[in-house]
Amino acid sequence: MKILISGFDPFGGENINPAYEAIKLLPDSVRGAEIVKMEMPTVFHLTAEVLEEKVREVDPDVILCIGQAGGRCGLTPERVAINVDDARIPDNNQQQPIDEKIKKDGPAAYFSSLPIKAMVEKMREANVPSSVSNSAGTFVCNHIMYQVLYMIDKNFQGKTGGFIHCPFIPEQVIDKPNQPSMSLADIVKGLKAGIEAIIERDGQEDIKEMGGAIH
Amino acid sequence: MKILISGFDPFGGENINPAYEAIKLLPDSVRGAEIVKMEMPTVFHLTAEVLEEKVREVDPDVILCIGQAGGRCGLTPERVAINVDDARIPDNNQQQPIDEKIKKDGPAAYFSSLPIKAMVEKMREANVPSSVSNSAGTFVCNHIMYQVLYMIDKNFQGKTGGFIHCPFIPEQVIDKPNQPSMSLADIVKGLKAGIEAIIERDGQEDIKEMGGAIH
Amino acid sequence: MKILISGFDPFGGENINPAYEAIKLLPDSVRGAEIVKMEMPTVFHLTAEVLEEKVREVDPDVILCIGQAGGRCGLTPERVAINVDDARIPDNNQQQPIDEKIKKDGPAAYFSSLPIKAMVEKMREANVPSSVSNSAGTFVCNHIMYQVLYMIDKNFQGKTGGFIHCPFIPEQVIDKPNQPSMSLADIVKGLKAGIEAIIERDGQEDIKEMGGAIH
Amino acid sequence: MKILISGFDPFGGENINPAYEAIKLLPDSVRGAEIVKMEMPTVFHLTAEVLEEKVREVDPDVILCIGQAGGRCGLTPERVAINVDDARIPDNNQQQPIDEKIKKDGPAAYFSSLPIKAMVEKMREANVPSSVSNSAGTFVCNHIMYQVLYMIDKNFQGKTGGFIHCPFIPEQVIDKPNQPSMSLADIVKGLKAGIEAIIERDGQEDIKEMGGAIH
């Protein structure tokens, strides 16, 4: 099994992106699966081109993207990506689309094809706070998750894909009062646990564990 | 123009649901549009049956559903409904589905067909805190929004539909420390402003106003 | 009985201060007690001079100061004022003291001499969210509460005094995402309930109701 | 220099208290200062008796108490302790005092005699999120901080004392949605940095750094 794990570069005024920092610290192999790592630009559409090129080169079984969600307390596998870009801040190429479809011929949304409930369970067993998220936002994180699932749907049937958001790391919140963070070591541990869940559930349905939100 | 506005009954241990309390206080006519009011049960699937019956009876142009989102600070028109029930608490019939599709033959999601950005703008002009929400959760609120848009898609082409979440009202948070609330009068004022936006934008696209979320 | 109720003018970039807006809407008499209203400047030390002059003129039995605590969800009678100015932002005279004693010859702190638990109870009975606060901060609100209790201690024995923080009102949070607010009508209702509690408990100890904080 | 560092045992339904877990991992010597460690019971008054006995035995220069503040995002040196017990939950001996003075003959409050601003600065330099707290609550944490400063005032003039609150650690929030945490390693690193600041500022005033709160 081969897993392509991709993290964004820094955006929104940050000097680092904990997503890619964590990816760099992952082992090259987890339970026999090969881990291929890459950094993506935080730029609408360009990020998908860069990623698709890598997918063609590497031919992974799983495409797992990681992004930063400042303000969250735990790792959050995303349930769904929606077909809209609505940027609150400019991306790293100064684009700021408002209510534009990501793919004119795409469906309204794609559900993650990763076992998000099993991933959350495994992360928690590793003592890493985690929960399912029901919105990846409307910025580049949601964009790449949608693009990955779209490219799988159109061109790479058989592969699976999804997205995990991770919190700020402590050094990012030194000057941000009352902002939660998670140590880089715990993010790495949690991502590794999530990857293990993906490997374990390969070919099976996700587990049926409560993980919804009332609103 | 005829607008059917529907609010849930109380759930989750609450004695009242501010959604329906607010609806009862709306005028019967807004800018010449007729307002038809109803209460829906907080019960998966049954709520859609009850609503669809009313739609057939009333034949509204717009179907607007209202629900409670305890913990939110403002009125939040919902952008999207997703095809999944994942209940954190039982509904009012003791059903608690986990990761079940709402409609086997439905798409992953439906976007609101109401002008959510214009609604937010109008609510703010009325001095009622408001913002777009990118997730209606995975409980009965998301369920009915999905069902409404599904029934429009399948059986009532030409109608429009959507959902607005409203905060707790003050009397609900007396015993809940540090929970935001909004006065019933302001919820009513905000819903009225939202309805006005729906009427004003009738037949046009939504305005292009920033309203996304980074994550 | 005569109650002097004093509210700050706007500060921190706000155009209004809900504290004084609410005071203006209070009746001139509550349960037979005369209500005398005034506005105070949000300026360290000057605010105490202005208030003390009014106290000498009016000779009230009770001195109740009201200020804005943006971000809080309910009305919060303050338990204690501490002998320090530590300003995160400049006051309205561009003063920004860091860790300076308010009164060189004053004690470390004064407890409110108002019945804060009874006030909270009465506010809740009026359906206004309320709780005891254990810190009035270190800005001008804490400053005037300390000054009032110091001037009573030194020069006006027999009078009682204290402070209530109130939330933003809705129009202040239109452009502040995820900030709680309370309607001006509810702030007025809650202040009136608090004043009633002060009148009812006159000459008695406060009620023994749980209202502490773990940390 | 000798520093007695004391942490509470678990309370409030928790199996561990990160305060004492972190203390156990501190070195026995920091910059030449001897570190003496102890666990205190989370019991009103008894905890002070246990601590005072240890102070008589060890004769430390500094008494630093550490407690858990679930919900906080960073380490928070406390500025002030107030003379009141007002328990929201029972202590570990089932005592739940409401609005009782800690010491009948004590002042309303004591300010920390530790250099809290320098401690925060040093913690931040070590990349550990930290800020001054203006309220230690009204439970056993505030109680012991008050007791320490009272016993220094009455019986141990020349010693200094204070309190630091620390967040939950990740394993404590696995089942608590949306609760921030801090890794045990970072708590240890932050406490060590705080101790270094205490040693460095020995005999001097605290630094003048902004660290107040508006309310």
Image (cartoon, coloured by chain):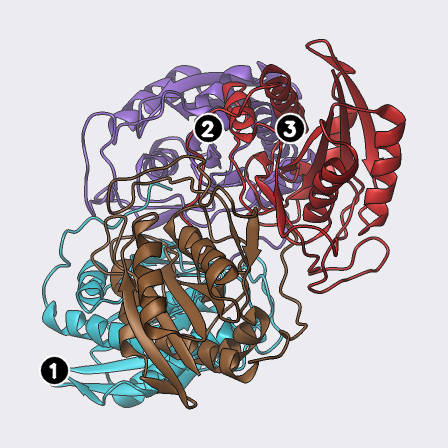
Chain colours: A purple, B cyan, C brown, D red
- The tally of labels here is 3
Crowd band around label 3 with a 10 angstrom C-alpha radius: few (<14), some (14–19), many (20+) = many
Q: How far apart are the two marked residues, 2 and 3, measured between alpha carbons?
A: 14 Å
Up-down relation of residue B124 to residue A197 (above or below): below
* Residue positioned 46% across, 45% down in the render: C103
Nearest to the observer: residue C122 or residue A68: C122
Question: Disc 2 designates what residue?
Answer: A174
The spot of residue D150 in percent (x, y) is 72, 42
The spot of residue C79 in percent (x, y) is 55, 60
Residues indicated by labels 2 and 3 sit on the same polypeptide chain: no
Identify the secondary structure beneath mark 2. loop
Residues indicated by labels 2 and 1 sit on the same polypeptide chain: no
Question: From the viewer's perspective, is D138 left or right of A147?
Answer: right
Identify the secondary structure beneath mark 3. helix
The spot of residue C115 in percent (x, y) is 56, 72
Task: Tell me which chain the residue with mark 2 is part of.
Answer: A
Identify the secondary structure beneath mark 1. loop
Q: Is residue D34 visible?
A: yes
* Residue positioned 81% across, 26% down in the render: D37
Question: From the viewer's perspective, is D126 left or right of B30?
Answer: right
Q: Which mark is residue D187?
A: 3
Question: Disc 1 designates what residue?
Answer: B31
Q: Which mark is residue A139?
A: none
Nearest to the observer: residue C148 or residue D207: C148
Task: Tell me which chain the residue with mark 3 is part of.
Answer: D
Question: From the viewer's perspective, is D57 left or right of B38?
Answer: right
Up-down relation of residue C92 to residue A70 (above or below): below
Q: Is residue B149 visible?
A: no
Q: How far apart are the two marked residues, 2 and 1, measured between alpha carbons?
A: 52 Å
Task: Tell me which chain the residue with mark 1 is part of.
Answer: B
Nearest to the observer: residue A206 or residue D136: D136
